[in-house]
Amino acid sequence: MSIRPRVQMPGLRGPYNGSMLPGLEPIVARNRVPISSEVTRRLLDFLISGQIKPGERLPSERNLAESLGVGRSHVREAIKSLAVLGLIDVRQGDGTYLKRVDSPLLPLAIQWGLLLGAKQSHDLVEARSQLEMLVASLAAERRDAVALEEMRRHLEIMHTTTDHDVFVEADVAFHLQITQAAGNQSLLQIMRSIRGLLEVWISRVAHAPGTRPVTWAEHAAVFEAIQRSDPVAARRAMQAHMDGARERLRGTLGDQELPSDRTPDAPAGEA
């Protein structure tokens, strides 16, 4: 009979015996609380407890599932949500690493229920796509010279900068400027409220090799349609950008899939 050796797990205090992890107790199912939601919250508490430091590798999916007393599929769902929020880094073939525990998105994530599993994350991606398409079409109808100049300025920064943070800031500012040009304060407030989330997604995608020129070209197409005051073209250009951005985000998450279906085409003549 072979005996499983007791080894020290990275980021954990004390030896790990291959089953239970310190700080993670088995989950007891509660009515009306999805298991995936409870798993995500438990993992979040575990990560911010200090037992794992930024840059250290998390225990394996199997180890987490055993400690929580749940199936590995529930752990995968939780990891998807935490990865989309920029809290952990999933490296194919190398494991999952803690990036940070002080994300400004955490209060909003908990408030909005974004840590309830992949389905809710999928819904948010879909909602953002529809919102961006709407504001692009409105901006094409209502933009003025000042708004166009601001969009052009942000677009130029994206095109010329070599600094990652500057690129992300200009990208987010471009989208917010489009929303402002749409002339609807309610839509502007919604977009501003998810600015932090936009920064996380855009930053993840911008780090991937070869994505910045493609992203810039998609933004340029949106700008040109708005400049021509063509709401249908603006909506479709933004749709193409959202579809492309979603696929690039999928690429940064490896096998942690976001919906692969494209955003439904707008009806002909729809603004």
Image: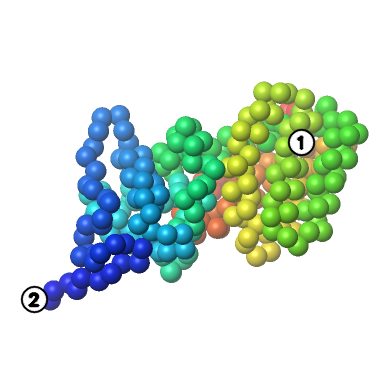
Q: Is residue 78 visible?
A: no
- Residue at coordinates 40% horizontally, 39% vertically from top-left? 116
**Quadrant including the C terminus:** top right
Name the N-terminal-most of marks 1 and 2: 2
The image quarter containing residue 234 is top right
Is 114 rendered above or below residue 31?
below
User: Callout 1, which amino acid?
Assistant: Ile
- Provide the residue designation for mark 1: 178
Nearest the viewer among 202 and 50 is 50
Q: Which quarter of the rendering shows the N terminus?
A: bottom left
Q: Does residue 182 appear in this view?
A: yes
Secondary structure under tag 2 reads loop
Along the viewing direction, whichever of 17 and 241 lies nearer the viewer:
17
The extreme bottom residue here reads: 2
Checking the image for residue 1, the label placed there is 2
Q: Which kind of residue does numbered mark 2 sit on?
A: Met
Image location (x, y in percent) of residue 13: 29, 62
Residue drawn at x 84%, y 52% as measured from the top left: 156
Graded by Cα atoms within 10 Å as few (under 14), some (14 to 19) or many (20 or more), the crowding at tag 1 reads many
Up the image or down, 27 lies above or below 22; here it is: above
**In front: 42, or 180?**
42
Left/right placement of residue 112 relative to residue 134 reads left
Q: Residue at x 81, y 49 (%)?
A: 155
Distance between mark 1 and mark 2 Cα atoms: 67 Å
Q: Relative to residue 120, is residue 13 drawn left or right?
A: left
Q: Are marks 1 and 2 in contact (CB under 8 Å)?
A: no
Measured as percent of width and height from the top left, residue 30 is found at 25, 33
Say whether residue 67 is left or right of residue 61: left
Residue 43 placement (x, y as % from top left) = 36, 49
Rate crowding at label 2 as few (under 14), some (14 to 19) or many (20 or more) other CA atoms within 10 Å. Answer: few
73 to the left or right of 147: left
As drawn, which residue projects farthest toward the left? 1
